[in-house]
Image (spheres, rainbow, N blue to C red):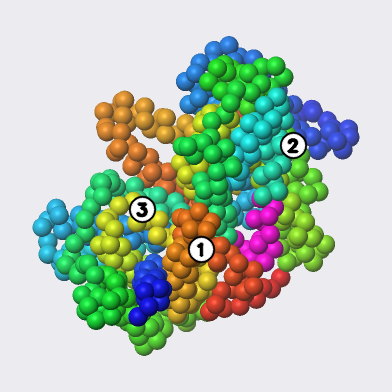
Amino acid sequence: MLYRETGQFKTSYPKDQAIFPIAQDKAFILLVLAVAFLAVPPFINDYYAKAILIPFLSYTMAAIGLNILVGYCGQISLGTGGFMAVGAFATYKLMTSFPGLDFAAVVVLAGFVTAGVGALFGLPSLRIKGFYLAVATLAAQFFLVWLFNKVGWFYNYSPTGQITAPPATSFGVLVTGPEASPAAGYLFCLIFVCIFALVAKNLTRGNIGRQWMAIRDMDIAAELVGVQPLRAKLSAFAVSSFFIGMAGALYFGVWLGAAEPTEAFGINISFLVLFMIIIGGLGSILGSFLGAAFMVLLPIALKTVMVDGMGLQAVTAKHFEILLLGVLIIFFLIVEPHGLARLWSTVKEKLRLWPFPY
Amino acid sequence: MNPDVLFFFETVISGLMAGVMYALVALGFVLIFKASGVFNFAQGVLALFAALTLTGVMEKFGLPAWAGIIVTILVMIAVAWLIERLVLQHLVNQEPIILFMATIGLAYVIEGTGDILWGSNVKVLDIGLPQGASDFLLDNYNLYVEKLEIVAAVTSAILVAVLAVFFQKTRIGRALRAVADDHQAALSVGISLRTIWVVVWSVAGIVALVAGIMWGTKSGVQFSLSLIALKALPVLILGGFTSIPGAIVGGLIIGVGEKIAEIYAGPIIGGAIENWFAYMLALAFLLFRPQGLFGEKIIERV
């Protein structure tokens, strides 16, 4: 009854094309933002920040990035882990070379570095597609991780090969390092994710986003109607890597604090982020949020239920988690290839007609 | 012989043998891709699952090796049937990329099931294959070659020959090739797609079992076995997704290239390049010949 667009008249094109054309949607999203910005920080503790909220936010950023490439431009990539590593190592080098630099600037710069690397590895996409491209991005994954393991310059020749985020501030507030308060790290990530989710949403709604979708739906036809594949594909790779690089920066700087390339940026991360966008919804920014939330909460929920609740061994629970993950992927691909985001819009559709569906 | 030359020969031979092992895994990919157009990411996990099942039934029920292998083959056929019933049947006419991602999910399901059923600790697989260096070659030519690798090479040669006869001469083999050419045309002359898919996944399961036995005997049955699938991908790129000879030749090229690069170029740029060298080789190759060595040229219509 409450969710109706009746009586909300649009008198101009900009109003009609707003991101949230329905007033209730706008109110809902503002409420969510208000809770996230005002209600959460006073109650946040180390566990919530490090185990749920900051992982969720950094994975969301990565998922948005991958979704731009896979969901919007149709170029499959299995190199997410490698590109996140580029972001993380760029962050580390920037932080250690320019200690006074604002961490926000570091994150954005790391994004640009990753965008360059991503565009470079996107070059083969002009010649190859589909599975061949998937394998080409795997090459990026293995090569980049190897590079960060072997070349001492990247980890400042530290004997363990690990990188550790030094304390850094953003606008006078300490956000990285062990001394940073959980709330500061959380808010920093939240602001970044909100701003860049908006950027991504608008990019995908605009000219360039439509070019990407044309390439995804049928590249030859798109080329015939005047979309340049070179520009569209490379820009998708660059923009996607920009987001993934920033995600890597947040992942390493704010969440982990210390990272070792093989462990933290392995191929498992690539699959994890890919699963997020499949479950959340391919070609949907909202889906990136939902998928990331789902994949962060699922292991925690399973552990609570199976280990603490049913008294099973942690190993069994881990195996079951792998099994369940696979089942979920197949289930979503068969039943709802557009993922949680589509379920959400179906619910909204039903709500609009409730209680008199036709 | 000059020790340097000898060493080079040893490198090449061990590369060729490793290549045969890669080719075994790549074969499974090619079989499924040819018959259903599905890029089966789960092939490596299938090999792991087959090896796990084999060690499992041999340990738990005390079966001899030959009985264990027969039981495992039956299990792999059951798995193929289940995959067709539960997954593929519902994804007919979906885009290839969706099917690809479904096989990634499948890989997780099979891995999780295998771990829950048989446990995830490292197991020793011993079905009586010879191990250690070949004395004959070591004594007469001073060459160090593993016996197991020779067995693997001979086995895969037999396997390829059997597959070739199966594809060329038998009724089902002809049906398989018809399906590979054109799904709709095959359906219209009365070939059942679903039977074909079960057959082809069973064959891929058996190839996976052979690969699993070889790799399992070599380095123990454990999770890392499933990662050989990742090694097989560049082989496919090089050889082309649709060609059985391509899988073999690609495997040999990658095997030799990898070993030579590791030994001669590795020390210069920091070692451990085996992990990505194959991919870079494949990537460079792709830029010049996107369909692979023996692949069919892709023609697209709007």
Which residue corresponds to mark 2? Answer: A199
Circle 2: residue type: Val
Q: Secondary structure at mark 1?
A: helix
Query: Which residue appears at 84% of the width and 33% of the height?
Result: A15
Circle 3: residue type: Ser
Q: Where is residue A89 shown, x and y percent of the image?
A: 60, 39
Query: Which residue appears at 46% of the width and 55% of the height?
Result: B272
> Are discs 3 and 1 both within one chain?
yes
Q: Where is residue B234 shown, x and y percent of the image?
A: 50, 65
Q: Is residue A131 above or below residue A28?
A: below
Circle 1: residue type: Ala
Q: Secondary structure at mark 3?
A: helix
- Asked if residue A301 is among those painted magenta in the image, a careful observer would answer no
- The CA span between labels 1 and 2 is 45 Å
- For the question of whether residue B13 can be seen, the reply is no
What mark, if any, has residue B45 been given in the picture?
A: none
Asked whether, in this view, residue B42 is left or right of residue A355, the answer is left
State the residue in front, A255 or B96: A255
Which residue corresponds to mark 3? Answer: B224
Host chain of mark 1: B
Q: Is residue B18 above or below residue A279?
A: below
What residue span does the magenta drawing correspond to?
A118-133
Quadrant of the rendered structure where residue B131 is?
bottom left
